[in-house]
Amino acid sequence: MELFFLALLVILMATALGSGFPVAFALPGSAIITIGIAALSGYIFSSGTDAFFAHGGPSQWLSAGVTNFRGIYWEAERDTLIAIPLFVFMGIMLQRSKIAEDLLVTMARLFGPVPGGLGISVVFVGALLAATTGIVGATVVAMGLISLPAMLRNNYSVPLATGTIAASGTLGQIIPPSIVLIILADQLASAVDQAGAIRQTLYKQTTGEISMPSDFAVVSTSAGEMFLGAFLPGMVLVGLYMAFILGFALINPKAAPAVHHEGKFDRKFAVQVFVTLVPPLALIFLVLGSIIAGIATVNQAGAIGAVGAMVMAGYRLRDGERGAYSPAIIAILSLLAIALVVSFIGAINIKRIETSQDLLGLVIALIAVSLLLIAVFWSGWRTMKIEDTLRGVMVETAKTTSLVFIILVGAAMLTSSFRAFGGEELVKDFLLGLPGGFWAQFLIVMMVIFILGFFLDFIEIAVVVVPIVAPILLADPSANVTAVWLGVMIGLNIQTSFLTPPFGFALFYLRGVAPAVVKTIDMYKGVIAFIGLQLFALAIVGLYPQLVNYLPNRASLLSETAPPPKNPRLQYCMENLVYEDFQQNGDTILSAIQTAEGLDVSYLPEDLQKDLAKGFEQARNAIPQMTAIVDAEEAVAAAAGDYRPLHGEVRALERDARRIDETIEELKVIVSRSGETGIYTVAQGERAQARIDVLTVEHDALLAEIPAEWEGVNKTFADIQKAETKARQTYRRTVDQAYEPLGEVRLILSDADKLASKEAEIEGLKEAISNLDAAAAVEQIEAVRSSVGEVEGASDIRKGLSAARKIMRGKTPDKDEAIAEIDNSLAELKADLEWRERGAAELQPQLAAYDEVIKDNIGLRQQSRLPDGLALDVAACLSGHRDISLNF
């Protein structure tokens, strides 16, 4: 019966959408009606309202719906969706203020003399508008009103003209900032959690280990990472569009002729291009640059974009009038002043004003911020008074945002009901049962999304399909894809939904503004090539995941919050790079170690001498141990060729057996709760038991198909894998032990001057002990003791201070005995200073030279962050997909 109600749910949803019923109500309405019918049927015809639900019942479904609703609106940590109204406001404001129109007209003049130049200018402006607005409808309408008549007037092919405009308008879906990327990031965040739990369970079931290595975990994503990941694929798509139009114009010049505009390309035109092009580019730089640089979150960048769009609208709406640019100039000067203050003085904190320079910076910052606020409010006043622009933009923003959020809530309800009837399990069983592994599953999902794009909008696809299929795809260790890559691939695929008939929304928008001479069939013909280009871009990004993953990895590893080199996820790539360094510079490293071993350290304390000697010895072991890792890795690769087919066969059988086990466990619950006092009837319990018997036979038959040699082959391969794991662990332990003593000794020697400054403080304690009461003396001893504790390696000096403190705390404080302990500390300090000062003068420069040679290889794990050059190499290495399935 669950299948019946699942089919009813899908039919109701499809019927409602096909009849033109609003999506925002079709999704939750289908769920509510189906849930109600199923609950009522269970109450009347069976054991209760929960009878026809595969998971839980109406009460659990309602609870899940409330949880989802709360997660969307009230969960403080999940604030990604706040960026949606900000970017919508930015886009509509730029469109209403006619900045998009200026861009199109100016770029058409600039590119006109090139074959296909008008079409190329439309693509160029479409990419700019995508990076500033992201609103497909506004972009298509604007370009349709301005560019289409010009293209037709210059004898452009009607299919090419309409296809170019419609396709360029859809760039806003993949070029950040994009609403669909924000929604996908939000949906993938929960999918990553589910996928991580699935992978953890799979690892435990297949290996017997309780905890999975953290470098095998599914990596989460955010809206900022999605923006970074989608940037290069968006540029690839723009390049394909331009190349196609240029190629088409060269092959068939009559269909896309060059257009020579009247007027000269003089200084006046150059100024016009500058004024038209630079502000949108500056806004793109502020919005995306602040995210890439880690200066602002996506929400903060959205606020920057909204304010920037309002400032731009403020001067555009007064175009040609005196003082039109005054607010914008004030805003620019204010930002420059703030940037100068931050660059030369640093962060301003009104509570930490210590110098006249700090006070000057504070005054300048206050003036600059005040002027910036004046410029913003001035621009806002203009947009409010001129043509009531601000009110219209805010109303449209509220409408669009409300629609998005209502669809999100409705989709959450639909997804919950889909799961309640076992739909997610059906999808999971279908995908996992496909031959060909992950890529077969992925292609099927992409195909389904592409077909759904013929009938559904991007929001419905993102919020209905992604939560169901994403956990399954992300959990698969054979591909081990990142959530960013999967999100961008789905985003590229969803983009085609705007062009595919019969419900291609970009076609509807263009049809609404196109003249009667443009036939609908010509529009459909025109988008076919661009749909093909979108699918080609999808294939390129699928084959080269580095296009997606590199920028997020780069931004992460170069940011102030970059993970330390000890992060488990970085080790594999770091060790590959260190091995290359050892191969190229091994002789230099060994020579540096030999030189360090010959240093005179006889005057250092015995424990430091031993630590340094052990560190040098371990440094010598690092290179051969790295070679052992490479040998072990090659052994695994050699054995994997024969092992992989058998591994895949057995894991598939075990997976099918586990699914049967899960069904048996559910049936056992029915059996245990059946009877006269149970919630299930005796007949239901008997049917469940009969089904258990059949499934048990199937389960045993599946396990019997496992080849007899599996156990031995699996053990042999596991031993080879363990040898590689052990080699890596040994190497990591060795390099840590090789570098830690070096860092410790260098830190101790560098604190020589700091220790010398403590002598007067300790000497002053004698007078304090003699003249103060016991409590005050204890307080002063404690303060000096803490101060000495800031010096590295001063524990022996602190011992006397601790003893003096203990004496003065006693019932009968002995001042002479306490002063004697202070003298012991002073003696220790003078003895320490002797070898520290000599070491700082003689040994420290030699250890620094040794450190310079080994810090980026042997000492890499001990650094606070990756050096920029290595961080870029690690980012490139992490950007590929690494198959880890043989570890499961």
Image: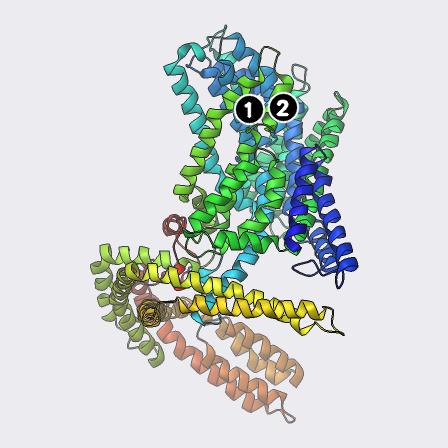
User: Residue placed at 62% from the left, 43% from the top?
Assistant: 300
In the rendering, at what x and y percent does residue 765 appear?
56, 79
Residue occupying the point 48% across, 44% down: 444
The correct choice, above or below, for 632 with respect to 388 in the image is below
Front residue of this view, candidates 699 and 35: 699
* Closer to the camera in the image, 359 or 533: 533
Callout 1: few (<14), some (14-19), or many (20+) C-alpha neighbours within 10 Å?
many
Q: Is residue 817 left or right of residue 543?
A: right
> Eyeballing the image, is 384 above or below 54?
above
Q: Judge whether residue 92 can be spotted in this image.
A: yes
Q: Residue furthest bottom?
A: 812
Determine whether the residue tagged by mark 2 lies in a helix, strand or loop: helix
- Tell me whether circle 2 and circle 1 mark residues in contact (CB < 8 Å): yes
- The residue at the point 46 percent across, 25 percent down is 529
Q: How many neighbours does mark 2 have within 10 angstroms: few (below 14), some (14-19), or many (20 or more)?
A: many
Whether residue 773 appears in this view of the structure is: no
The residue to which callout 1 is attached is 166
Q: CA distance from mark 2 to mark 1?
A: 8 Å
Q: Amino acid at mark 1?
A: Ala
Q: Tell me the residue at 64%/94% (across/down).
A: 812
| Residue 624 in picture, x, y percent from top left | 24, 66
Disc assigned to residue 509 = 2
Q: Where is the C terminus found, in terms of image quarters?
A: bottom left
Comparing 766 with 260, the one in front is 260
In the picture as drawn, the residue positioned furthest to the top comes out as 262
Q: Amino acid at mark 2?
A: Tyr
Q: Which mark is residue 501?
A: none
Of the two numbered discs 2 and 1 on the same chain, state the one appearing first in sequence. Answer: 1
Question: In front here: 29 or 306?
Answer: 29
